[in-house]
Image (spheres, helix red, strand yellow):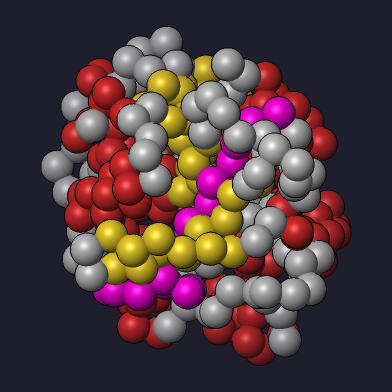
């Protein structure tokens, strides 16, 4: 971006571009003022560039350089999603460093938070601050059940003509249903240059990698010494909320926010409260 060009702070208007690293071409979007340490967003299971809530991204991009990206084999990125989340972390490292950055902040959600944990453990020098939302630690109790929960809710959504995220991310009460509908509508705000949907092959690979993560030997999270903000809803069916509390106990000095009457997508349901908190936490 040249100095004369206006700064884009709306995710709905952020252009999609690509960078090739080895045999893989990554699709990504950038917005917010350039300069300083960027905030790289790590997305959830089955998600592409179009699955980030603009009400969470835009307040951060108002003051920070924000980068979102498609993992290999997902959306408009080429390549193949790997068999383990440790490998996905190495792919993320290759992407970030290919852009010329040697220090970043990370904002992660769900599977993205699992990948982020592995990235910080393997490359601690790369990360300044870490946000972990709707996620849990390797070997976390019942995390490997995400496969069954996901397929069950996909079926429920199909039978009702709904988006699966309405079931997976939100409580099925009046408050949750209203929040789910509002969230889905916000994801449609971008009307041009939309991303490709994830393929069935990549989706299944992600599920298997999450299952391996959930059944794996617990990681030593005491190695995460970066300032860490953890957030979730109090009724997360995908990655049980108690695992957010476990992350908080095991990551020294971390902060924890649990939102009431909300599920996996608690940060989206409470975006008006959460986004300013996240923006302040990530401030330089």
Instruction: Please provide the residue range marked out in magenta.
Output: 63-80
Q: Quadrant of the C terminus?
A: top right
Spot occupied by residue 223 in the image (x, y as percentages of width and height): 23, 20
Magenta stretch encompasses residue 96: no
- Examine the rendering and report whether any part of residue 146 can be seen: no
Q: Residue at position x 69%, y 66% from top?
A: 166
Q: Is residue 44 above or below residue 234?
A: below
Which is nearer the eye, 116 or 251? Answer: 116
Specify the principal SS of the magenta part.
loop
Q: Can residue 67 be seen in this view?
A: yes
Horizontally, residue 5 falls left or right of residue 75, namely right
- Indicate the position of residue 142 as horizontal and vertical percent values: 34, 51
Provide residue 140's location: percent of width, then percent of height. Answer: 30, 42
Vertical placement of residue 47 versus 248, above or below: below
Outermost residue, left direction? 217
The image quadrant that residue 82 belongs to is bottom left
Residue depicted at x 34% and y 30%: 102
Give left or right: position of 123 versus 102.
left
* Residue 139 sits above or below residue 274 on the image: below
In this rendering, the answer to whether 123 lies above or below 146 is above
Based on the picture, tell me whether residue 68 belongs to the magenta stretch. Answer: yes
Residue located 40% across and 60% down the image:
19
- Taking depth in this image into account, of 87 and 110 the one nearest to the observer is 87
Q: Which of 228 and 220 is in front in this view?
A: 228
Horizontal relation, residue 188 to residue 38: left or right? right
């Amino acid at each position: 971006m040249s100095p004369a060009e206006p700064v884009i702070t709306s995710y709905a208007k952020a252009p999609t571009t690509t960078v090739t690293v080895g045999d893989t071409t990554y699709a990504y979007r950038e917005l917010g003022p350039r300069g300083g340490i960027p905030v790289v967003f790590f997305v959830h299971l089955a998600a592409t560039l179009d699955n980030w809530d603009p009400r969470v991204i835009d307040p951060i991009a108002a003051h920070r350089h924000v980068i979102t990206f498609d993992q290999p084999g997902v959306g408009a990125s080429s390549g193949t999603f790997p068999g383990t989340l440790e490998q996905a972390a190495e792919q993320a490292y290759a992407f970030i460093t290919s852009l010329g950055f040697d220090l970043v902040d990370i904002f992660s959600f769900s599977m993205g938070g699992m990948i982020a944990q592995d990235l910080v453990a393997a490359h601690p020098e790369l990360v300044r601050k870490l946000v972990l939302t709707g996620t849990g630690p390797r070997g976390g109790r019942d995390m490997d059940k995400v496969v069954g929960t996901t397929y069950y809710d996909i079926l429920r959504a199909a039978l009702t003509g709904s988006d699966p995220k309405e079931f997976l991310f939100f409580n099925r009460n009046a408050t949750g249903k209203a929040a789910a509908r509002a969230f889905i509508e916000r994801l449609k705000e971008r009307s041009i240059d939309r991303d490709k949907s994830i393929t069935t092959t990549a989706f299944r690979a992600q599920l298997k990698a999450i299952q391996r993560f959930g059944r794996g030997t617990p990681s030593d999270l005491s190695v995460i010494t970066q300032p860490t903000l953890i957030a979730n809803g109090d009724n997360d069916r995908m990655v049980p909320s108690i695992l957010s509390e476990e992350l908080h106990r095991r990551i020294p000095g971390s902060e924890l926010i649990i939102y009431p009457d909300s599920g996996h997508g608690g940060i989206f349901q409470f975006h008006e409260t959460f986004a300013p908190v996240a923006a302040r936490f990530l401030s330089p």
